[in-house]
Amino acid sequence: FFSSETLRYFRSTNGSYYRSFSTERKLVSPPIVYIKGEEMTRYCMDLILKQWIEPNVDISSWQFYDLSCKSRDDTEDQVLHDAIAAGKSLGSIFKEPTVTPTAEQKEKLGLKKAWGSPNGAMRRGWKGITISRDTIHIE
């Protein structure tokens, strides 16, 4: 499946270069900030991570942040600020879709407040980097 040792270099958006290599067992991934969302995308991405990525890729250098409504509420939105700082530092980010709760969802989820969309704060923190909503096609 993978060659015995293949070096790969990746350039992040902040200009840093990361080395990655594969062994016979796993591809070693460069660092990335992984921002978890919620609902079906979170469920699907958890399946993809556990069934396809983790068995084949060493993701120990990844930093995970939970931006679900409940997590943002529990941390008074500190998790958003931490994710932005990590993304700014690494320049390599994957973000699942997040929910901007309505007043009804705020009550249903038992939130202290209806936290706004994190995307604007992310764009400001990452100096205008676009939050892409493009579909990833795998052939």
Image (cartoon, rainbow, N blue to C red):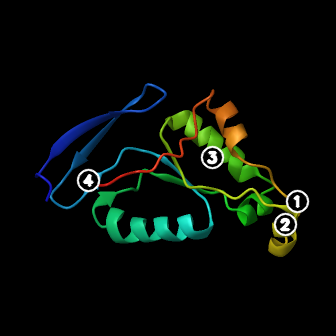
On the picture, is 53 further left or further right than 88?
left
| Quarter assignment of residue 96 | bottom right
- Against 102, residue 31 (above or below) is above
Label 1, on which residue? 113
Name the amino acid, label 4.
Leu
Which structural element holds mark 1? Answer: loop
Marked residue nearer the N-terminal end (2 or 4): 4
Marked residue nearer the N-terminal end (1 or 3): 3
Residue 106's disc number: 2
Label 3, on which residue? 83
Marked residue nearer the N-terminal end (2 or 1): 2
What is the tally of numbered marks visible in this picture? 4
- Against 52, residue 29 (above or below) is above
Decide which of 113, 2 is in the foreground and name it: 113
Of marks 1 and 3, the one in the foreground: 1
Label 4, on which residue? 27
- Contact between labelled residues 1 and 2, with CB atoms less than 8 Å apart: yes
